Image (cartoon, rainbow, N blue to C red):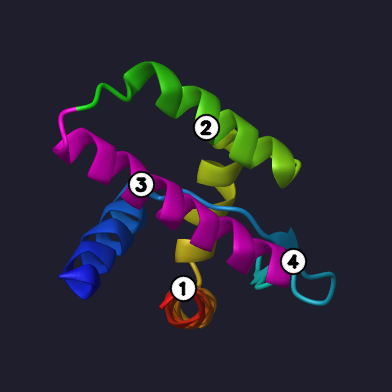
Amino acid sequence: MKNKILFYILTFLFLVGSGCATHRSDQPGELEVTDSLISLIADVHLLEAQLTRERASGKKTDSLADQRYDSLFARYHTTKTGYERILKQLTLTPDRFVEAYDSVIQRLNKLEKETE
């Protein structure tokens, strides 16, 4: 069930095209997959999972969701628009995208094991 939810969240974010990364100086236009990027994407997935769980239990999350996202993005010194623009750029380089999401999945699996 958790893997199915993770799959849907990853698919949703891929289709929406959200993100954060830094430019590599040696290859203009390509994005470097950084630890900060991995942490941000993982935290966005965790927040979305939390909001989905709250919605499923009947809670209204609309007013709090924006505040939670704003707080999350502020922690990483970005905005929702910046996150979306950079992840969209990341999707233009499939190798980097796969590299990033492999790392995100590893990070989420590690967090899951730590909470068991």
Q: Which residue is mark 4?
A: 28
Q: Which of label 4 and label 3 is nearer to you? A: 3
Q: Amino acid at mark 2?
A: Arg
Q: Which residue is mark 1?
A: 115
Tell me the CA gap for discs 4 and 2. 33 Å
Q: Which residues are magenta?
A: 35-58
Q: Which residue is mark 2?
A: 68
Residue 99: x %, y % from top left: 52, 82
Residue 114: x %, y % from top left: 51, 79
Tell me the CA gap for discs 1 and 3. 15 Å
**Main secondary structure along the magenta-highlighted residues:** helix
Tell me the CA gap for discs 2 and 3. 11 Å
Q: Amino acid at mark 4?
A: Pro
Q: Which residue is mark 3?
A: 50
Do the CB atoms of the residues marked 4 and 2 lie less than 8 Å apart?
Answer: no
For label 1, the crowd category at 10 Å Cα-Cα, with few meaning under 14, some 14 to 19 and many 20 or more, is few
Residue at (61%, 40%) from the top-left corner? 72
